[in-house]
């Protein structure tokens, strides 16, 4: 027997696998916390410059609502000292006009922050506003860069040492450095600690998902993958409630990190990957695990069942094969398909996190918006289960178009219609979340078997590059407030257009070689109705939204 045949005999999704998926899904909640907590810990409340002229401070500090844009001159400048009339004698509107018309070059006395929504944030504690406002976005980009480094480093370590040890190490480091970030003495130490947390996000997501798919039968792998995505969505929603209850950023950071210590019991309950053990010539240990799974599923294996020598030889041969990323762009069709897929990964992740990490821009209550955006994740991921079997290409194109158009429409909605802007942003989030779910599967089917892992790996790197750029794009607000959403919309629509150049893969055979892509591929012949041989193990879970 080979491993898939053994899984079919012991149960591809029995009690053993269901318990395993509980252990895999629980960390997804904390991963969502770490990925999105900067929405609250890095928020910039309305603020005013503390003037050396006491009257101006007394007149305006009680009415932060006057500052419609935190980046306005009023928020970043002190009133000119040449005015002799006390502002206390003016009403708030006149005082605002006076300060705007006679603002000095900068604020020398520091800033006064509104405490109506947040008691403290990273921005309020270390004055990350005005001249230092860019540090906040750069810190977010450095965190996302940590995810890129983690995918590369921990991916290689997992291939060498196995999935289970890397998951355990990743959870330990994530918890320790996450708690440490709550006690950071300055912004730079905070960024370094968050960077390390970012590397472990990739370690846990990637290897937990791979561990699950390597133990699951082919008929249930897609559904099992969606289940893990749902738990990330649950974390999205729960974070809104936690942040609402905990308004101090240090306490919130501690609250999302400390529960990670509970995962110490994974040392005793998390199994190794039998597939990985076989690929590394540890067949006896693999068979012990398989027998344990069979007993738990109520389908014990016979003692004389063994892994066939031919399957062992195939595993060894596959380990020795060397396929390089050059093969992805060496031939014309493969080059076109690869570059488009890489762009789709890039734009999906960039817009996903661009919308998720900047919900305060839409004008509604930040906690309510976070809750709504989390709820949108559920139907967005569910609907793909019904559209994918009809057409991969049309599904990808349609959801990208929905996301892009919705982003562009937000720029035409005035600030006072914040509910409409939020609804449009929610529609955009729906489209991009569904598109992100599809690109995993589409990528695995476009790339031929011999370079599929290389293709998915490069796509993951492009996705991480999009994540790094997502916070930086919001620096464009200094030139135009609508620039980020306009860029998100146009780049997403470009992706929709490029999707037209990709092949349809629904209900087709997967290509095995580059020649299958470049030449006449039997799977593309009319009338081919044989079910698609989908290989979910090729789905690299580096990016889970």
Image: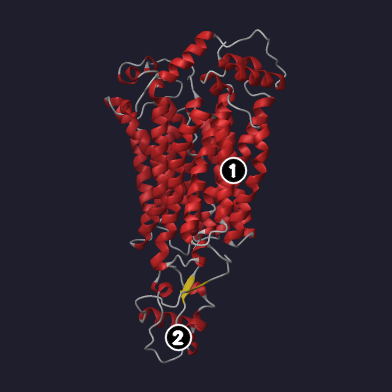
CA–CA distance in space, label 2 to label 1: 51 Å
Would you place residue 435 above or below residue 12 in this image? below
Give x and y (percent) for residue 331: 27, 24
Crowding at dot 2, Cα within 10 Å, few <14 / some 14-19 / many 20+, comes out as: some
Would you place residue 171 above or below residue 367 in this image? above
Instruction: Tell me the residue that label 2 is attached to.
Output: 53
Q: Is residue 375 visible?
A: no
Verify CB contact (< 8 Å) between mark 2 and mark 1.
Answer: no
Give x and y (percent) for residue 382: 56, 36
Give x and y (percent) for residue 545: 51, 42
Give x and y (percent) for residue 205: 53, 38
Q: Quadrant of residue 472?
A: bottom left
Q: Quadrant of residue 234?
A: top right
Would you place residue 114 above or below residue 233 in this image? below
For image coordinates 67% across by 18% down, the residue present is: 291
For image coordinates 50% across by 9% down, the residue present is: 310
Instruction: Tell me the residue that label 1 is attached to.
Output: 172
For image coordinates 55% across by 40% down, the residue present is: 170
Under tag 2, what secondary structure?
loop
How are the colours assigned in the image? secondary structure
Query: In the displayed structure, does residue 156 sit left or right of residue 335?
Result: right
In this view of the protein, which residue sits in the foreground, 527 or 120?
A: 120
- Label 2 or label 1, whichever comes before in sequence order: 2
Q: Nearer the viewer, mark 2 or mark 1?
A: 1
User: Which residue is at the far bottom?
Assistant: 84
Q: Is residue 34 visible?
A: yes
For image coordinates 52% across by 55% down, the residue present is: 39
Q: Quadrant of residue 27?
A: top right
């Amino acid at each position: 027997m080979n491993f898939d045949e053994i899984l079919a005999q012991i149960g591809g999704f029995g009690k053993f696998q269901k318990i395993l998926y509980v252990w895999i899904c629980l960390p997804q909640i904390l991963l969502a916390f770490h990925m999105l907590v900067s929405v609250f810990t890095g928020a910039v409340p309305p603020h005013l410059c503390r003037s050396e002229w006491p009257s101006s401070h007394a007149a305006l500090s009680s009415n932060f609502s006057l500052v419609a844009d935190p980046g306005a001159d009023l928020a970043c400048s002190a009133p000119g000292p040449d005015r002799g009339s006390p502002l206390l004698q003016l009403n708030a509107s006149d005082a605002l006009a006076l300060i705007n018309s006679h603002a000095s070059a900068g604020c020398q006395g520091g800033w006064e922050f509104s405490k109506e929504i947040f008691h403290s944030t990273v921005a309020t504690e270390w004055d990350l506003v005005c001249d230092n406002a860019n540090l906040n976005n750069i810190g977010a980009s450095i965190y996302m860069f940590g995810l890129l480094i983690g995918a590369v480093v921990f991916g290689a370590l997992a291939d060498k040492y196995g999935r289970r040890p890397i998951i355990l190490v990743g959870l330990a480091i994530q918890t320790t450095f996450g708690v440490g970030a709550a006690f950071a003495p300055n912004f730079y130490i905070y960024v370094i600690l968050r960077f390390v947390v970012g590397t472990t996000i990739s370690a846990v997501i990637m290897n937990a998902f791979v561990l699950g798919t390597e133990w699951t039968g082919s008929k249930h792998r897609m559904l099992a993958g969606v289940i893990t995505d749902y738990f990330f969505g649950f974390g999205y929603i729960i974070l809104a409630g936690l942040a609402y209850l905990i308004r101090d950023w240090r306490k919130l950071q501690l609250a999302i990190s400390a529960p990670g210590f509970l995962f110490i019991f994974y040392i005793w309950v998390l199994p190794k990957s039998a597939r990985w053990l076989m690929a590394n010539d540890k067949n006896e240990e693999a068979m012990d695990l398989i027998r344990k799974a069979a007993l738990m599923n109520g389908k014990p294996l016979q003692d004389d069942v063994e892994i066939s020598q031919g399957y062992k030889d195939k595993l060894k041969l596959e380990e020795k094969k060397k396929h390089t990323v050059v093969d992805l762009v060496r031939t014309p069709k493969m080059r076109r398909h690869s570059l488009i897929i890489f762009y789709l990964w890039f734009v999906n992740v960039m817009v996903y996190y661009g919308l998720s990490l900047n919900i305060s821009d839409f004008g509604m209550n930040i906690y309510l918006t976070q809750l709504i955006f989390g709820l949108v994740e559920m139907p967005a991921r569910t609907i793909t289960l019904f559209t994918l079997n009809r057409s991969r290409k049309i599904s990808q194109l349609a959801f990208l178009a929905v996301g892009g158009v919705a982003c562009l429409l937000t720029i035409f909605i005035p600030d006072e219609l914040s509910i409409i802007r939020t609804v449009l942003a929610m529609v955009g989030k729906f489209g991009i979340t569904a598109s992100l779910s599809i690109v995993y599967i589409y990528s695995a089917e476009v790339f031929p078997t011999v370079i599929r892992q290389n293709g998915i790996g490069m796509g993951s790197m492009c996705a991480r590059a999009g994540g790094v750029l997502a916070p930086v794009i919001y620096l464009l607000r200094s030139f135009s407030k609508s620039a980020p959403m306009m860029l998100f919309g146009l780049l997403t629509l470009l992706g929709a257009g490029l999707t037209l150049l990709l092949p349809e893969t629904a209900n087709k055979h997967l290509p095995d070689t580059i020649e299958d892509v470049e030449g006449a591929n039997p799977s593309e012949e009319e009338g081919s109705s044989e079910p698609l041989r989908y290989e979910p193990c090729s789905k690299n879970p580096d990016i889970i939204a």
